[in-house]
Every structure is written in C-alpha cells, then in structure tokens.
Amino acid sequence: MFSVERSQPFLDLIGLVEPEAITRAVDLGCGSGELTSLAFDRLGVADMVGLDNSPAMLHAAGAHARPGLRFESTDIAPWTSGGDLDLVLANASLQWVPDHPAVLARWTAALAPGGQLAVQVPSNASMPSHTVAVEVAHREPFLSAFGGVPPVDPVAANVLAPEQYSQLLYDLGFDRQHVRLQVYPHVLASSRDVVQWVRGTTLTRFQRLLPPELFERFVADYTARLVEVVGDRSPFFFGFRRVLMWGCRST
C-alpha cells in the first residue's frame, strides 16, 4: 500500500546524484530491494550492494540480485568502508539510528575522492500522525505495558533540522551540497488511512512491545484520537515532510 507515494522521495533523491562514473555504490537500509535495483539501473552503477539487518527484507531483496547487484546483512549505524565508494545512498533509514553526526562521518569516510552522499529522512515528529501516537502511549493500560516508559519516537529523537545537516556536510568536507525540506502532498481516501500509512513505520515500535490483542487496542485508540485531532475527512490531505540531502567531495 502507498508504494507510489513512498517511492517518489527516493526518485527525487537519486535525481540529485550526478551519475557520471559511479563504479561502486552502497544502499544503506535497502529494505526489499526494489528501489535499490531501480537506482542500480538508473545511475548505471557497475557494482552495488544493498545492506539491511532484517532477514525478511533481505529475503525479498534476493529476488532483485543479479550480476553487479547483491544484498547483504549488516547494521548500518556502525558501517563504514575504506574510502573506496563513489556513492553512499540511504533512503528513509538514517532516522532509525542515533547520533547522526557520528554516523554521517562514518558514511563519509567510505567515499573515494569525488564520492557522493545522498540521504533522505522523514521529518514528521511534530505532526499529528506522530504526536497522537505518543499521547496514546501514555495512557493506561499501555503505559504499564511499557513499564512506565513508552518507546522513543526515533524521528523526534534522531532527526536533525535541515540547516544542521547542511552544517554537517560542510564540516565533513563536502565541497558541494544540496539540502532541502520537502513536503510531499499525499491525498488519502480518508483521515483514517493515515493509520495504515504509519502502521508499518512509526507504530512498529509499539507493536514490538505489546501483545497482539493490546496492540490492536492501541491502534483502535490511536485511530479514534487521530480522527478527533484532524477530523473525520474524506478525502484527506496528508502533508509528509522529508529532508533530502546530497553532497559531493572533491578530495
């Protein structure tokens, strides 16, 4: 569901990449591999690896493997390489790991001279889709199930402002850069469809900690409260904020 809407930021991200002479590339947090395969083709990469730590995602990604394109298991947070890559790509994965300055420094160290970094992260922590989830998590019986401490929203905890990413790219030695906050104008059938959008992303941190029946109650309470906040509207305009950043190092 929403595959077209979720693909557009990736297409915009690789549109920032200068495709000349990309011999070696990596896609960090490759997921099920469809978009990695698309980047491999569109950018004319000779050798590309997609990295993820989900066995289920890597199993799905295996269907896209072919000569020059492979998929491997790793944790993207500590990952780096020996200054031998022409492109480090990360689409909607950096938000899951903390300490972005340190992580981006490691990813930058993986680049060869003239290498490019292209990263996209959601930036919706202040929107009702996220704030309502936090509000509901502080209600009983969910709060007790979380041991009094609901799981942290990774977007709120980890994602920086666009100008902070721009400063980071400068500090990391990128001679050229492009950083922007973009709002993607999704029109959903109704405001209730927001629940389906976030069920596979921001709500997963609650699902991991709650038994199935309690998680379904959480989703029901979240849905009811979200409709109270944004209204029961059909269609529903869902503006989704994302930060896109690209940099190129000459040395």
Image: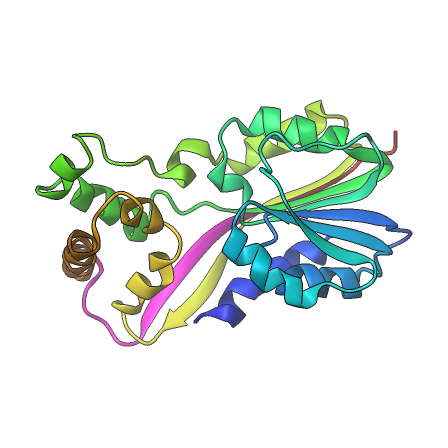
Q: Quadrant of the N terminus?
A: bottom left
- Comparing 93 with 213, the one in front is 213
Towards the viewer: 168 or 206: 206
Magenta segment range? 228-245
Which residue sits at x=32%, y=51%? 203
The image quarter containing residue 61 is bottom right
Q: Residue 216 at what x, y percent from top left?
A: 19, 58
In this image, 238 relative to 108: left or right? left
Asked if residue 49 can be seen in this view, the reply is yes
- Which residue occupies 28% across, 73% down? 190
The x, y position of residue 209, in whole percent, is 26, 43
Q: Residue furthest left?
A: 140
| Point 64% across, 27% down: residue | 168
Left or right, 142 with respect to 95, comes to: left
Residue 56 x/y as whole percent: 51, 57
Does residue 24 appear to the left or right of 186 in the view shown? right
Depicted 154 relative to depicted 244: above or below? above
Q: Is residue 181 left or right of residue 236?
A: right
Q: Is residue 237 magenta?
A: yes
Does the magenta-highlighted stretch encompass residue 63?
Answer: no
